[in-house]
Amino acid sequence: MSDSIRLARTDTYEHTISGLLKKRADLFNEAERIRDRMAEIKNDISALDRVLGTLGYTGDLDAEMPRQKRQVLFGRGELTRAILDELRDAPRPLGSREIAQGIVALSGQDARDRKYVTDLTRRVSKALRMLKESGSVRSLGDCKGNLRWTLQS
């Protein structure tokens, strides 16, 4: 067994880059297959629910579901701090989606993941309503009826 390290025969990382790009494409394809399968499963569950209703089942279908583990995205107070930081640094009032996108960018998550951004936007909206009740932020309506948020002066 040799103690020396074999050096690469090239000065560039062409092979490594090529391999990483292939792996990246494979992972995107796998994610697409998983998303498609999830959609199929949701459609199957909806079909089963309709058949159960047709057959006269009157129970609570949601009560029959196994409890899902709650996904913790932020620690206690972390989302509120991130929202206030975004608003503090903003030159103008921001919408909840803009705030969520800023938080995604800061946290290093994938901003292209629409489901994650939508879920985070929903959480940001709720947190903003709570902050409004406590007097920390205020909302302004724009011409389309959307709320823009800014820190309370």
Image: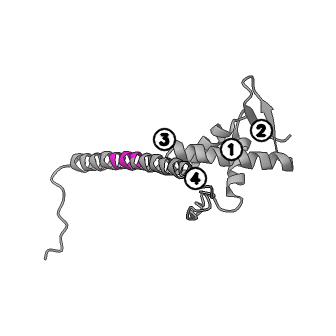
- The residue that mark 2 highlights is 150
Q: What's the CA distance linking mark 2 and mark 4?
A: 51 Å
What kind of residue is marked 3? Arg
| Structural crowding at the residue carrying mark 3, measured as other residues with C-alpha within 10 Å and reported as few (<14), some (14–19) or many (≥20) | few
Query: Which is more N-terminal, label 4 or label 3?
Result: 4
Q: What's the CA distance linking mark 1 and mark 4?
A: 51 Å
Secondary structure category for the residue under label 2: strand
Q: What's the CA distance linking mark 3 and mark 2?
A: 26 Å
Query: Which is more N-terminal, label 2 or label 3?
Result: 3
- The residue that mark 4 highlights is 56
What kind of residue is marked 2? Thr
- Foreground mark, 1 or 3? 3
- Foreground mark, 3 or 2? 3
- Foreground mark, 3 or 4? 4
- Foreground mark, 2 or 4? 4
Dominant secondary structure of the residues highlighted in magenta in the image: helix
| Residue 7, magenta (yes or no) | no
* Viewer-proximal residue among 8 and 73: 73
Residue 76 horizontal/vertical position (percent) = 69, 62
Please give the range of residues in magenta: 28-36
- The residue that mark 1 highlights is 86
Using the rendered image of the protein, determine whether residue 8 is visible from the camera's viewpoint. Answer: yes
Q: What's the CA distance linking mark 3 and mark 4?
A: 43 Å
